[in-house]
Image (tube, grey):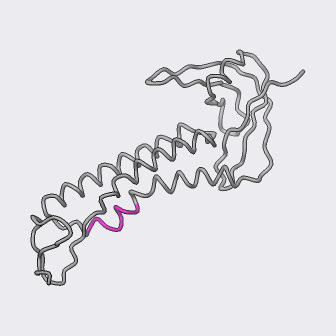
Amino acid sequence: MDEPGIDRGHDFLARPHAFGERHHRTNRWLPFAPLAGLIGIMVATLIYPPLDRASFVMPLLLLFIACTFLLAQVQKKQRRGDDVSAFFPVTTWLAWAPVCVALIVLANGALDRNPVDSHPEVITQKLVRRGKSNSYYFQTPSWRPNHSFEELQVPYRVFTQFQTNDRIIVEVHRGAFGIPWLGAIQKTHN
């Protein structure tokens, strides 16, 4: 028979609580959800790169940081024996949000049956952004209203196939959920 205030399956040093009171504990695997989501988002954006990748990835990185910080605070309070029930279910939803975003990006590309929009453009500039790993971009005039130019992130092998002033066709997919993503970039055949 269990004694009131002792949670036999968890921490014996936890502060006792009243009989019948539910003592909320975080699942030990919950902190891995944001990390799984971040990895999933990285994979999803490699497979179906959003047209506005930078404006897409930065908020998701901030979401990941917020999730990680909140989970660290909850775990710290829990180790001290504080009641963490006030943090739930919001913490659980926030922890799983990056996984949900990764699934949305994957589904947006995988379920996209819209016709592909082809845009004839000219490469006005080739850019290399250096960091822990290099990123490669083509800059072209924009086909979208309220945009003066497009910066298209491309793999290194594509980057080396083209030169400034090359005429190209940029394929843009509309996305099943309305998140446009970059398809193939090809030379025009004149």
> Between residues 87 and 111, which one lies in front from this camera angle?
111
Which residue lies most toward the front here?
A: 1
Q: Main secondary structure of the magenta part?
A: helix
4 falls in the magenta region: no
Quarter of the view holding residue 165: top right
Quarter the C terminus occupies: top right
153, above or below 6, in the image: above
70 relative to 54 in the view: left or right = left
129 relative to 86 in the view: left or right = right
90 falls in the magenta region: yes
Which residue lies most toward the right here?
A: 190
> Between residues 139 and 83, which one lies in front from this camera angle?
83
Q: Residue at x 34, y 57 (%)?
A: 29
Determine if residue 182 is in view.
yes
Marker count (numbered): 0
43, above or below 28, in the image: above
Residue 112 position within the rendered picture, expressed as x and y whole percent measured from the top left:
72, 52
Quarter the N terminus occupies: bottom left
Residue 181 position within the rendered picture, expressed as x and y whole percent measured from the top left:
66, 43
Q: Which residues are magenta?
A: 86-93
29, above or below 17, in the image: above
Q: Residue at x 53, y 51 (%)?
A: 102
> Between residues 60 and 2, which one lies in front from this camera angle?
2
Q: Residue at x 74, y 30 (%)?
A: 185
Residue 134 position within the rendered picture, expressed as x and y whole percent measured from the top left:
51, 22
103 relative to 82 in the view: left or right = right
Residue 19 position within the rendered picture, expressed as x and y whole percent measured from the top left:
14, 83
Q: Residue at x 45, y 23 (%)?
A: 131
Determine if residue 151 is in view.
no
